[in-house]
Image (cartoon, coloured by chain):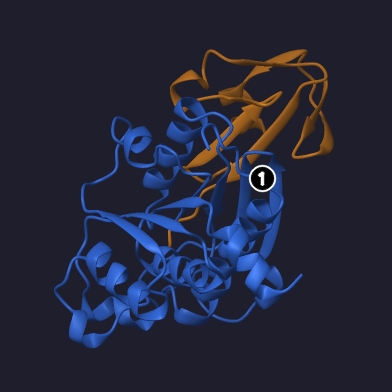
Chain colours: A blue, B orange
Amino acid sequence: MRFSEIRDHLAQFRVGIAGAGGLGSNCAVALARSGVGTIVLSDFDVVEPANLNRQYFFSAQIGMMKSAALKENIARVNPDITVIAHTEKLDIRNIPEIFAGCDVIVEAFDRDDMKEMLIETILEKMPGIPVIVGSGLAGWGQSEAIKFRKIDDTLYVCGDESTIAGDDLPPMAPRVGMVANMQANTVVELLMKKTKDYFSL
Amino acid sequence: MKILLNNREEEFEAGTLTVSEMIEQKKFSFRMRIIKINGVLVPKEKYDTTYIREGDNVLMLYLMSGG
């Protein structure tokens, strides 16, 4: 299959990305390069100097809302992508509204409790929508520990499922990028198998 | 009882266990996790009142901070 055909197929779909930090920013850019038609981003944070060790932002963007900065960066990579950027904090109530119509959702939060809340909310309130989780990416090396696991048709995990990010084990570009790109790769795989249902033509 | 835990057979002395008891017996330590029994999500607030029985298919995923 030629890339032009792959891109045209992916252009039909909408992918939600919860969090625009290390996982979300890198995953979003990979999906934009691949040609995913619509990307719905959500992040309430601003770009800080400490983010630049792994997140897809530039030093001139320090102080900008991450979702706005990422929208700008995606437009520079691929102006054909539609980006819907939200800045409210995600919670049980607004997740189904913000990600309504998404074909796949990428879990790209930093904190474990937020990851749990997001996944539980999608599984309960948006049944059938696949969630691609990132879990375990701190530090460096141990490439062999990073893996992909399908739990069932709506739940997939990328990461080492064991390291916890902290002051002495920071998340860094190489490993975060590996997991973010595995998440993007999973999204592409699911979308390439999917046919878009047209209700009205 | 015998159950499937993350696609591996596990045996417990008890004939039935709550999700909380299973977590304690297996010494699963991380705070944040997703658990599904026979394909159905068990939310955290139901760990004490949801039972695991013979033959159940239990899937568990740990959520590690970092992103």
* Residue depicted at 72% across the width and 74% down the height: A2
Query: In the displayed structure, would residue A88 be above or below residue B13?
Result: below
Q: In the depicted view, which residue is nearer to us: A73 or B15?
A: A73
Q: Is residue A23 visible?
A: yes
Q: For the residue marked with disc 1, what is the amino acid?
A: Thr
Q: In the depicted view, which residue is nearer to us: A201 or A157?
A: A201
Total marks shown come to 1
Q: Residue B40, located in which quarter of the rendered image?
A: top right
The residue labelled by disc 1 is A195
Which image quadrant: the N terminus of chain A? bottom right
Q: In the depicted view, which residue is nearer to us: B21 or A158?
A: A158
- Secondary structure of residue under mark 1: loop
* Residue depicted at 66% across the width and 66% down the height: A6
Q: Residue B1, located in which quarter of the rendered image?
A: top right
Which chain does the residue under circle 1 lie in?
A
Q: Give the percent coordinates (x, y) of residue B23.
A: 61, 32
